[in-house]
Image: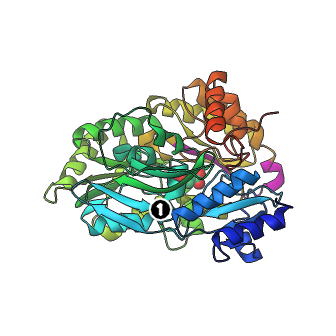
Amino acid sequence: MMQGPGSAVSLLTALVGADVISNEPQQIARFASDHRGLYRGQALAVARPRKLAEISKILGFCNQHRLAVVPAAGNTSYCGGATPDASGTQLVVSLERMNTVRRVLPLDYCIEVEAGCILQNVQTAATAAERFFPLAIGAQGSCQIGGNLATNAGGLNVLRYGMMRDLVLGLEVVLADGRVLSHLSTLRKDNTGYDLKSLFLGSEGTLGIISAATLKLFPLPRVRATALAQVANPAAAVELLALMREASGDRVSSFELIPGVALDLVSKYMSDISAPFAVPAPWQVLVEWSSSQPREPLETALTAALQAAAERGLLQDAALAQNETQRAAFWRLRENIPTAQQRAGASLKHDISVPISQLAAFIERGAALAAQLAPEGFLVAYGHVGDGNLHFNVSQKAAADRSEFLTRAPALQRALHDCVAELGGSFSAEHGIGQLKVEELARYSAPHELELMRAVKQLLDPNGIMNPGKVLKPRG
Ligand code: 2HG
Ligand code: ZN
Protein backbone atom coordinates (compact mmCIF):
# COMPACT_ATOMS: atom_id res chain seq x y z
CA MET A 1 0.00 0.00 0.00
CA MET A 2 1.37 3.41 -0.98
CA GLN A 3 1.29 6.00 1.82
CA GLY A 4 2.22 9.17 -0.09
CA PRO A 5 4.57 10.73 -2.59
CA GLY A 6 7.66 9.92 -0.49
CA SER A 7 6.76 6.28 -0.41
CA ALA A 8 6.16 6.31 -4.18
CA VAL A 9 9.76 7.37 -4.68
CA SER A 10 11.00 4.65 -2.29
CA LEU A 11 8.90 1.98 -3.97
CA LEU A 12 10.00 3.04 -7.45
CA THR A 13 13.60 3.04 -6.27
CA ALA A 14 13.15 -0.47 -4.89
CA LEU A 15 11.63 -1.50 -8.22
CA VAL A 16 14.24 -0.17 -10.68
CA GLY A 17 17.14 1.04 -8.55
CA ALA A 18 18.55 4.26 -7.11
CA ASP A 19 20.55 4.73 -10.28
CA VAL A 20 17.30 5.19 -12.24
CA ILE A 21 15.12 7.18 -9.83
CA SER A 22 16.31 10.50 -8.47
CA ASN A 23 14.64 13.21 -6.44
CA GLU A 24 17.74 15.32 -6.11
CA PRO A 25 16.93 19.02 -6.64
CA GLN A 26 19.49 19.48 -9.46
CA GLN A 27 17.98 16.59 -11.39
CA ILE A 28 14.40 17.83 -10.86
CA ALA A 29 15.41 21.39 -11.80
CA ARG A 30 16.56 20.23 -15.27
CA PHE A 31 12.98 19.41 -16.18
CA ALA A 32 11.10 22.03 -14.14
CA SER A 33 10.67 24.59 -16.90
CA ASP A 34 10.50 24.78 -20.67
CA HIS A 35 13.29 26.42 -22.65
CA ARG A 36 11.35 29.64 -23.22
CA GLY A 37 10.54 29.97 -19.53
CA LEU A 38 6.78 30.08 -20.23
CA TYR A 39 6.03 27.22 -17.86
CA ARG A 40 7.45 26.30 -14.49
CA GLY A 41 6.55 23.13 -12.61
CA GLN A 42 7.83 20.86 -9.90
CA ALA A 43 8.35 17.12 -10.33
CA LEU A 44 8.15 14.47 -7.63
CA ALA A 45 11.23 12.75 -9.03
CA VAL A 46 12.96 11.98 -12.31
CA ALA A 47 13.25 8.48 -13.76
CA ARG A 48 16.12 7.89 -16.21
CA PRO A 49 15.74 4.30 -17.36
CA ARG A 50 18.52 2.52 -19.24
CA LYS A 51 16.38 -0.18 -20.84
CA LEU A 52 12.95 -1.01 -22.11
CA ALA A 53 12.13 -3.34 -19.21
CA GLU A 54 12.70 -0.49 -16.76
CA ILE A 55 10.30 1.86 -18.58
CA SER A 56 7.81 -0.94 -18.56
CA LYS A 57 8.13 -1.52 -14.82
CA ILE A 58 7.93 2.22 -14.09
CA LEU A 59 4.74 2.70 -16.10
CA GLY A 60 3.19 -0.47 -14.68
CA PHE A 61 3.82 0.89 -11.19
CA CYS A 62 2.56 4.39 -12.00
CA ASN A 63 -0.57 3.01 -13.58
CA GLN A 64 -1.30 0.81 -10.60
CA HIS A 65 -0.77 3.69 -8.16
CA ARG A 66 -2.30 6.44 -10.34
CA LEU A 67 0.94 8.36 -10.41
CA ALA A 68 1.10 10.93 -13.22
CA VAL A 69 3.97 10.59 -15.70
CA VAL A 70 5.51 13.38 -17.79
CA PRO A 71 7.71 12.01 -20.59
CA ALA A 72 10.59 14.39 -21.30
CA ALA A 73 13.13 14.60 -24.12
CA GLY A 74 15.48 17.41 -25.15
CA ASN A 75 13.29 20.18 -23.70
CA THR A 76 13.29 22.27 -26.87
CA SER A 77 9.52 22.36 -27.39
CA TYR A 78 7.52 25.56 -27.79
CA CYS A 79 4.27 24.48 -26.13
CA GLY A 80 5.23 23.26 -22.64
CA GLY A 81 4.40 19.64 -23.45
CA ALA A 82 7.24 18.22 -21.36
CA THR A 83 6.95 20.43 -18.28
CA PRO A 84 5.32 18.93 -15.17
CA ASP A 85 2.58 20.82 -13.35
CA ALA A 86 3.24 22.67 -10.10
CA SER A 87 1.85 19.97 -7.79
CA GLY A 88 5.17 18.20 -7.22
CA THR A 89 3.38 14.88 -7.61
CA GLN A 90 4.31 13.99 -11.19
CA LEU A 91 7.13 11.69 -12.25
CA VAL A 92 9.29 12.92 -15.13
CA VAL A 93 10.55 10.07 -17.31
CA SER A 94 13.56 10.96 -19.42
CA LEU A 95 14.95 8.54 -22.00
CA GLU A 96 18.24 10.41 -22.36
CA ARG A 97 20.23 7.31 -21.40
CA MET A 98 18.57 5.21 -24.08
CA ASN A 99 20.54 6.79 -26.88
CA THR A 100 21.86 3.93 -28.97
CA VAL A 101 21.64 3.79 -32.73
CA ARG A 102 20.74 0.10 -32.81
CA ARG A 103 21.32 -0.60 -36.49
CA VAL A 104 21.56 1.04 -39.88
CA LEU A 105 20.20 -1.00 -42.77
CA PRO A 106 21.47 0.64 -45.97
CA LEU A 107 19.67 -1.68 -48.37
CA ASP A 108 16.39 -1.24 -46.52
CA TYR A 109 17.07 2.49 -46.38
CA CYS A 110 16.25 2.63 -42.69
CA ILE A 111 17.78 3.11 -39.28
CA GLU A 112 16.66 1.78 -35.90
CA VAL A 113 17.27 4.16 -33.01
CA GLU A 114 16.39 4.51 -29.36
CA ALA A 115 14.23 7.44 -28.38
CA GLY A 116 16.93 9.23 -26.39
CA CYS A 117 19.22 9.67 -29.42
CA ILE A 118 20.05 13.28 -30.20
CA LEU A 119 18.71 14.09 -33.67
CA GLN A 120 22.12 15.16 -34.95
CA ASN A 121 23.63 11.82 -33.95
CA VAL A 122 21.00 10.03 -36.02
CA GLN A 123 21.82 12.23 -39.01
CA THR A 124 25.54 11.48 -38.53
CA ALA A 125 24.99 7.71 -38.23
CA ALA A 126 22.99 7.76 -41.46
CA THR A 127 25.68 9.77 -43.26
CA ALA A 128 28.36 7.32 -42.10
CA ALA A 129 26.41 4.64 -43.97
CA GLU A 130 26.12 6.93 -47.05
CA ARG A 131 22.46 7.54 -46.36
CA PHE A 132 20.44 10.62 -45.42
CA PHE A 133 18.08 11.20 -42.52
CA PRO A 134 16.25 14.37 -43.54
CA LEU A 135 14.64 15.76 -40.37
CA ALA A 136 16.44 19.06 -39.75
CA ILE A 137 15.47 21.61 -37.11
CA GLY A 138 17.29 24.42 -35.34
CA ALA A 139 17.47 22.38 -32.11
CA GLN A 140 18.97 19.28 -33.74
CA GLY A 141 22.10 19.40 -31.59
CA SER A 142 20.10 18.82 -28.40
CA CYS A 143 16.59 17.63 -29.22
CA GLN A 144 15.88 13.91 -28.96
CA ILE A 145 14.24 11.58 -31.45
CA GLY A 146 11.60 10.60 -28.88
CA GLY A 147 10.51 14.23 -28.65
CA ASN A 148 10.59 14.60 -32.43
CA LEU A 149 8.31 11.57 -32.74
CA ALA A 150 5.99 12.54 -29.91
CA THR A 151 5.49 16.04 -31.34
CA ASN A 152 5.62 15.05 -35.02
CA ALA A 153 8.38 17.60 -35.60
CA GLY A 154 8.70 19.41 -38.94
CA GLY A 155 11.50 21.83 -39.77
CA LEU A 156 13.49 22.75 -42.83
CA ASN A 157 13.18 19.77 -45.20
CA VAL A 158 9.50 18.92 -44.92
CA LEU A 159 8.71 20.18 -48.41
CA ARG A 160 10.76 17.35 -49.94
CA TYR A 161 10.75 14.61 -47.29
CA GLY A 162 7.71 15.14 -45.05
CA MET A 163 7.29 15.55 -41.30
CA MET A 164 8.44 13.08 -38.67
CA ARG A 165 5.24 11.05 -39.08
CA ASP A 166 6.14 10.50 -42.73
CA LEU A 167 9.61 9.27 -41.81
CA VAL A 168 8.54 6.44 -39.50
CA LEU A 169 8.39 2.79 -40.52
CA GLY A 170 8.03 1.25 -37.10
CA LEU A 171 7.74 2.07 -33.41
CA GLU A 172 8.34 0.48 -30.06
CA VAL A 173 6.01 1.98 -27.45
CA VAL A 174 5.49 1.33 -23.77
CA LEU A 175 1.78 1.59 -23.06
CA ALA A 176 0.41 3.30 -19.97
CA ASP A 177 0.03 -0.04 -18.17
CA GLY A 178 3.58 -1.11 -18.94
CA ARG A 179 2.83 -3.47 -21.83
CA VAL A 180 5.08 -3.04 -24.83
CA LEU A 181 3.85 -2.53 -28.36
CA SER A 182 6.81 -3.76 -30.34
CA HIS A 183 6.51 -2.97 -34.01
CA LEU A 184 9.96 -1.98 -35.23
CA SER A 185 9.02 -2.76 -38.79
CA THR A 186 11.35 -2.06 -41.69
CA LEU A 187 8.59 -2.57 -44.24
CA ARG A 188 7.40 0.02 -46.73
CA LYS A 189 4.24 -1.93 -47.41
CA ASP A 190 2.27 -3.48 -44.59
CA ASN A 191 -1.51 -3.26 -44.74
CA THR A 192 -2.34 -5.30 -41.69
CA GLY A 193 -5.19 -3.51 -39.99
CA TYR A 194 -5.21 -0.18 -38.18
CA ASP A 195 -2.02 1.85 -38.17
CA LEU A 196 -1.50 1.87 -34.40
CA LYS A 197 1.89 3.55 -34.50
CA SER A 198 0.38 6.66 -36.03
CA LEU A 199 -1.64 7.26 -32.85
CA PHE A 200 1.53 7.84 -30.86
CA LEU A 201 3.13 10.19 -33.38
CA GLY A 202 2.11 13.67 -32.31
CA SER A 203 0.43 12.42 -29.12
CA GLU A 204 2.99 14.28 -26.96
CA GLY A 205 3.36 11.55 -24.37
CA THR A 206 -0.33 11.41 -23.54
CA LEU A 207 -0.85 7.83 -24.73
CA GLY A 208 2.39 6.03 -23.91
CA ILE A 209 6.16 6.38 -24.13
CA ILE A 210 7.90 5.85 -27.46
CA SER A 211 11.12 3.97 -26.68
CA ALA A 212 12.52 3.26 -30.16
CA ALA A 213 11.75 3.69 -33.85
CA THR A 214 12.74 2.55 -37.30
CA LEU A 215 13.09 5.60 -39.51
CA LYS A 216 13.30 6.04 -43.27
CA LEU A 217 16.57 6.96 -44.90
CA PHE A 218 17.17 8.47 -48.33
CA PRO A 219 20.03 8.73 -50.83
CA LEU A 220 22.64 11.11 -49.50
CA PRO A 221 22.52 14.53 -51.18
CA ARG A 222 25.90 15.00 -52.89
CA VAL A 223 25.32 18.34 -54.52
CA ARG A 224 23.42 21.38 -53.37
CA ALA A 225 22.62 24.79 -54.79
CA THR A 226 21.50 27.48 -52.39
CA ALA A 227 20.34 31.04 -53.00
CA LEU A 228 18.95 33.94 -51.08
CA ALA A 229 16.55 35.86 -53.31
CA GLN A 230 14.80 39.16 -52.73
CA VAL A 231 11.22 38.56 -53.82
CA ALA A 232 8.64 41.16 -54.77
CA ASN A 233 6.14 40.05 -52.10
CA PRO A 234 4.79 36.86 -50.44
CA ALA A 235 2.56 36.08 -53.45
CA ALA A 236 5.67 36.18 -55.65
CA ALA A 237 7.42 33.81 -53.22
CA VAL A 238 4.59 31.30 -53.62
CA GLU A 239 4.75 31.56 -57.42
CA LEU A 240 8.51 31.21 -57.30
CA LEU A 241 8.15 28.00 -55.31
CA ALA A 242 5.87 26.46 -57.94
CA LEU A 243 8.22 27.57 -60.71
CA MET A 244 11.22 26.06 -58.93
CA ARG A 245 9.56 22.74 -58.22
CA GLU A 246 8.93 22.42 -61.95
CA ALA A 247 12.30 23.72 -63.09
CA SER A 248 14.31 21.54 -60.71
CA GLY A 249 12.53 18.26 -61.39
CA ASP A 250 11.17 18.55 -57.82
CA ARG A 251 14.60 18.85 -56.24
CA VAL A 252 13.69 21.80 -53.99
CA SER A 253 14.47 20.62 -50.47
CA SER A 254 13.97 23.88 -48.56
CA PHE A 255 12.09 27.07 -49.30
CA GLU A 256 12.07 29.53 -46.41
CA LEU A 257 10.53 32.98 -46.26
CA ILE A 258 12.63 35.58 -44.44
CA PRO A 259 11.39 39.15 -43.94
CA GLY A 260 13.86 42.04 -43.96
CA VAL A 261 12.97 42.78 -40.36
CA ALA A 262 14.26 39.33 -39.35
CA LEU A 263 17.57 39.94 -41.14
CA ASP A 264 17.83 43.26 -39.30
CA LEU A 265 17.26 41.49 -35.98
CA VAL A 266 19.89 38.85 -36.73
CA SER A 267 22.47 41.49 -37.75
CA LYS A 268 21.65 43.58 -34.69
CA TYR A 269 21.76 40.85 -32.06
CA MET A 270 24.35 38.47 -33.56
CA SER A 271 27.36 40.51 -34.47
CA ASP A 272 29.10 37.72 -36.41
CA ILE A 273 26.27 37.20 -38.91
CA SER A 274 25.37 39.51 -41.78
CA ALA A 275 23.14 39.36 -44.85
CA PRO A 276 24.61 39.38 -48.38
CA PHE A 277 22.52 42.42 -49.39
CA ALA A 278 23.40 45.99 -48.41
CA VAL A 279 19.74 46.67 -47.80
CA PRO A 280 17.41 43.76 -47.10
CA ALA A 281 14.18 43.78 -49.10
CA PRO A 282 10.89 43.49 -47.21
CA TRP A 283 10.85 39.78 -48.21
CA GLN A 284 13.49 37.24 -49.20
CA VAL A 285 13.44 33.49 -49.68
CA LEU A 286 16.19 31.06 -48.88
CA VAL A 287 15.94 28.28 -51.43
CA GLU A 288 17.95 25.08 -51.62
CA TRP A 289 17.99 22.40 -54.31
CA SER A 290 19.75 19.13 -53.70
CA SER A 291 20.51 15.91 -55.54
CA SER A 292 22.20 12.61 -54.83
CA GLN A 293 23.70 12.66 -58.34
CA PRO A 294 27.06 14.43 -57.83
CA ARG A 295 27.43 15.57 -61.44
CA GLU A 296 24.03 17.20 -61.66
CA PRO A 297 24.51 20.87 -62.66
CA LEU A 298 22.19 22.25 -60.01
CA GLU A 299 23.85 25.67 -59.74
CA THR A 300 23.43 26.30 -63.47
CA ALA A 301 19.82 25.21 -63.36
CA LEU A 302 19.07 27.28 -60.24
CA THR A 303 20.69 30.36 -61.81
CA ALA A 304 18.54 29.91 -64.92
CA ALA A 305 15.41 29.51 -62.82
CA LEU A 306 16.24 32.67 -60.84
CA GLN A 307 16.74 34.56 -64.10
CA ALA A 308 13.42 33.34 -65.48
CA ALA A 309 11.74 34.40 -62.24
CA ALA A 310 13.33 37.86 -62.40
CA GLU A 311 12.05 38.28 -65.98
CA ARG A 312 8.55 37.51 -64.73
CA GLY A 313 8.93 40.19 -62.04
CA LEU A 314 8.93 37.72 -59.14
CA LEU A 315 12.28 38.77 -57.71
CA GLN A 316 14.62 41.75 -57.75
CA ASP A 317 17.95 40.32 -56.78
CA ALA A 318 19.47 37.02 -55.75
CA ALA A 319 22.74 35.79 -54.25
CA LEU A 320 23.85 32.26 -55.04
CA ALA A 321 26.07 30.63 -52.41
CA GLN A 322 29.47 30.24 -54.09
CA ASN A 323 30.83 27.65 -51.69
CA GLU A 324 30.00 25.66 -48.57
CA THR A 325 31.02 28.54 -46.25
CA GLN A 326 28.56 30.89 -47.93
CA ARG A 327 25.87 28.27 -47.90
CA ALA A 328 26.38 27.77 -44.17
CA ALA A 329 26.28 31.55 -43.67
CA PHE A 330 22.90 31.78 -45.46
CA TRP A 331 21.54 29.04 -43.22
CA ARG A 332 22.90 30.70 -40.10
CA LEU A 333 20.89 33.79 -41.02
CA ARG A 334 17.74 31.72 -41.12
CA GLU A 335 18.41 29.46 -38.17
CA ASN A 336 19.28 32.31 -35.84
CA ILE A 337 16.03 34.21 -36.30
CA PRO A 338 14.43 32.67 -33.17
CA THR A 339 17.50 33.50 -31.04
CA ALA A 340 17.66 37.06 -32.36
CA GLN A 341 13.96 37.45 -31.71
CA GLN A 342 14.40 36.20 -28.18
CA ARG A 343 17.20 38.72 -27.60
CA ALA A 344 15.01 41.53 -28.93
CA GLY A 345 12.51 41.07 -26.07
CA ALA A 346 9.17 39.37 -25.54
CA SER A 347 7.43 37.79 -28.49
CA LEU A 348 3.99 36.44 -29.26
CA LYS A 349 4.37 33.31 -31.36
CA HIS A 350 1.88 31.78 -33.75
CA ASP A 351 2.95 28.55 -35.45
CA ILE A 352 0.31 28.41 -38.17
CA SER A 353 -0.22 26.78 -41.53
CA VAL A 354 -2.60 27.57 -44.38
CA PRO A 355 -2.92 26.13 -47.87
CA ILE A 356 0.07 27.51 -49.78
CA SER A 357 -2.30 29.27 -52.19
CA GLN A 358 -3.69 31.26 -49.22
CA LEU A 359 -0.35 32.33 -47.70
CA ALA A 360 -0.22 35.80 -49.18
CA ALA A 361 -3.82 36.49 -48.19
CA PHE A 362 -3.10 35.34 -44.65
CA ILE A 363 0.00 37.53 -44.35
CA GLU A 364 -1.96 40.57 -45.48
CA ARG A 365 -4.87 39.98 -43.12
CA GLY A 366 -2.63 38.84 -40.26
CA ALA A 367 -0.36 41.87 -40.55
CA ALA A 368 -3.36 44.19 -40.27
CA LEU A 369 -4.61 42.28 -37.21
CA ALA A 370 -1.19 42.41 -35.55
CA ALA A 371 -0.87 46.17 -36.14
CA GLN A 372 -4.33 46.77 -34.73
CA LEU A 373 -4.31 44.36 -31.77
CA ALA A 374 -0.67 44.52 -30.65
CA PRO A 375 0.47 48.10 -31.37
CA GLU A 376 3.44 47.69 -28.98
CA GLY A 377 4.89 45.05 -31.29
CA PHE A 378 6.19 44.54 -34.83
CA LEU A 379 5.63 41.59 -37.10
CA VAL A 380 8.39 39.03 -37.69
CA ALA A 381 6.65 36.51 -39.97
CA TYR A 382 8.97 33.89 -41.36
CA GLY A 383 9.30 30.22 -41.99
CA HIS A 384 8.56 27.19 -44.02
CA VAL A 385 6.62 28.60 -46.95
CA GLY A 386 7.15 25.39 -48.88
CA ASP A 387 4.90 23.73 -46.28
CA GLY A 388 2.43 26.62 -45.94
CA ASN A 389 3.83 27.03 -42.39
CA LEU A 390 4.64 30.46 -41.00
CA HIS A 391 5.99 31.49 -37.64
CA PHE A 392 3.73 34.51 -37.51
CA ASN A 393 5.53 36.08 -34.58
CA VAL A 394 5.16 39.54 -33.13
CA SER A 395 8.14 41.05 -31.29
CA GLN A 396 7.97 43.72 -28.64
CA LYS A 397 9.13 47.16 -29.83
CA ALA A 398 12.24 48.34 -27.95
CA ALA A 399 10.42 51.24 -26.29
CA ALA A 400 7.29 49.26 -25.40
CA ASP A 401 6.32 48.09 -21.95
CA ARG A 402 6.77 44.32 -21.77
CA SER A 403 3.78 43.54 -19.58
CA GLU A 404 1.46 45.79 -21.56
CA PHE A 405 2.64 44.09 -24.76
CA LEU A 406 2.01 40.65 -23.26
CA THR A 407 -1.59 41.54 -22.35
CA ARG A 408 -2.25 41.63 -26.12
CA ALA A 409 -1.57 37.91 -26.52
CA PRO A 410 -5.08 36.42 -26.07
CA ALA A 411 -6.95 38.80 -28.39
CA LEU A 412 -4.27 38.62 -31.08
CA GLN A 413 -4.10 34.85 -30.89
CA ARG A 414 -7.88 34.54 -31.19
CA ALA A 415 -8.06 36.86 -34.19
CA LEU A 416 -5.15 35.17 -35.99
CA HIS A 417 -6.37 31.66 -35.31
CA ASP A 418 -9.88 32.57 -36.46
CA CYS A 419 -8.38 33.94 -39.66
CA VAL A 420 -6.33 30.74 -40.11
CA ALA A 421 -9.46 28.64 -39.60
CA GLU A 422 -11.38 30.68 -42.18
CA LEU A 423 -8.63 30.05 -44.71
CA GLY A 424 -8.68 26.29 -44.05
CA GLY A 425 -5.45 26.26 -42.03
CA SER A 426 -4.13 24.99 -38.70
CA PHE A 427 -3.36 26.85 -35.46
CA SER A 428 -0.53 24.39 -34.79
CA ALA A 429 1.56 23.49 -37.80
CA GLU A 430 4.67 21.90 -36.33
CA HIS A 431 5.06 22.79 -32.64
CA GLY A 432 2.19 20.71 -31.26
CA ILE A 433 -0.37 21.44 -28.55
CA GLY A 434 1.40 20.84 -25.21
CA GLN A 435 -0.27 22.94 -22.55
CA LEU A 436 -0.13 26.13 -24.58
CA LYS A 437 -2.82 25.21 -27.10
CA VAL A 438 -5.14 22.92 -25.17
CA GLU A 439 -7.93 25.52 -25.36
CA GLU A 440 -7.32 26.00 -29.06
CA LEU A 441 -7.65 22.30 -29.80
CA ALA A 442 -10.92 22.17 -27.91
CA ARG A 443 -12.17 25.26 -29.72
CA TYR A 444 -11.24 24.50 -33.30
CA SER A 445 -11.90 20.73 -33.42
CA ALA A 446 -15.28 19.36 -34.45
CA PRO A 447 -17.08 17.92 -31.36
CA HIS A 448 -17.04 14.39 -32.74
CA GLU A 449 -13.32 14.68 -33.50
CA LEU A 450 -12.69 15.62 -29.90
CA GLU A 451 -14.90 12.76 -28.73
CA LEU A 452 -12.86 10.31 -30.81
CA MET A 453 -9.61 11.71 -29.39
CA ARG A 454 -10.99 11.33 -25.87
CA ALA A 455 -12.09 7.79 -26.61
CA VAL A 456 -8.58 6.91 -27.81
CA LYS A 457 -7.11 8.47 -24.68
CA GLN A 458 -9.56 6.55 -22.48
CA LEU A 459 -8.74 3.29 -24.23
CA LEU A 460 -4.97 3.63 -24.03
CA ASP A 461 -4.69 5.45 -20.72
CA PRO A 462 -7.83 4.66 -18.70
CA ASN A 463 -6.33 5.97 -15.46
CA GLY A 464 -5.24 9.26 -17.03
CA ILE A 465 -1.63 8.99 -15.87
CA MET A 466 0.08 9.92 -19.14
CA ASN A 467 1.04 13.59 -19.30
CA PRO A 468 -2.23 14.88 -17.84
CA GLY A 469 -3.32 18.36 -18.86
CA LYS A 470 -1.46 18.19 -22.18
CA VAL A 471 -3.15 18.07 -25.61
CA LEU A 472 -6.68 17.33 -24.32
CA LYS A 473 -8.45 19.63 -21.91
CA PRO A 474 -9.38 17.80 -18.68
CA ARG A 475 -13.11 17.09 -18.54
CA GLY A 476 -15.19 19.01 -16.06
C1 2HG B 1 11.98 27.65 -36.57
O1 2HG B 1 11.46 27.34 -37.65
C2 2HG B 1 11.43 27.07 -35.31
O2 2HG B 1 12.99 28.35 -36.51
C3 2HG B 1 11.15 28.13 -34.24
O3 2HG B 1 10.30 26.29 -35.56
C4 2HG B 1 10.06 29.07 -34.58
O4 2HG B 1 10.66 30.57 -32.79
C5 2HG B 1 9.79 30.19 -33.59
O5 2HG B 1 8.67 30.70 -33.58
ZN1 ZN C 1 9.83 26.14 -37.67
Q: Quadrant of residue 299?
A: bottom left
Outermost residue, right direction? Answer: 3
Decide if ligand 1 comes within 8 Å of the CB at mark 1.
no
- At label 1, counting other C-alpha atoms closer than 10 Å, the crowd grade (few under 14, some 14-19, many 20 or more) is many
Residue 122 part of the magenta-drawn span: no
Visible residue check, residue 352: yes
Kindly identify which residue carries mark 1: 333
Residue 363, image x and y in percent?
56, 36
Residue shown at 68%/50% (left/top)? Answer: 467
Look at the numbered disc 1 and give the secondary structure of its residue. Answer: helix
From the viewer's perspective, tell me whether residue 43 is left or right of residue 255: right
Q: Is residue 369 above or below residue 107?
A: above
Observer-nearest residue: 381 or 423?
A: 423
Observer-nearest residue: 182 or 341?
A: 182
Residue 383, image x and y in percent?
50, 48
Q: Which quadrant: the N terminus?
A: bottom right
Residue interval drawn in magenta:
390-406
Residue 221, image x and y in percent?
25, 58
Residue shown at 69%/38% (left/top)? Answer: 472
What amino acid is at disc 1? Leu
Q: Is residue 326 above or below residue 150?
A: below
Q: Which quadrant: the C terminus?
A: top right
From the viewer's perspective, tell me whether residue 149 is left or right of residue 106: right
Visible residue check, residue 276: no
Observer-nearest residue: 326 or 182?
A: 182
Q: Quadrant of residue 350?
A: top right
Outermost residue, left direction? Answer: 295
Observer-nearest residue: 428 or 451?
A: 451
Q: Is residue 301 above or below residue 418?
A: below
From the viewer's perspective, tell me whether residue 123 is left or right of residue 203: left
Residue shown at 63%/53% (left/top)? Answer: 78
Residue 400 part of the magenta-drawn span: yes
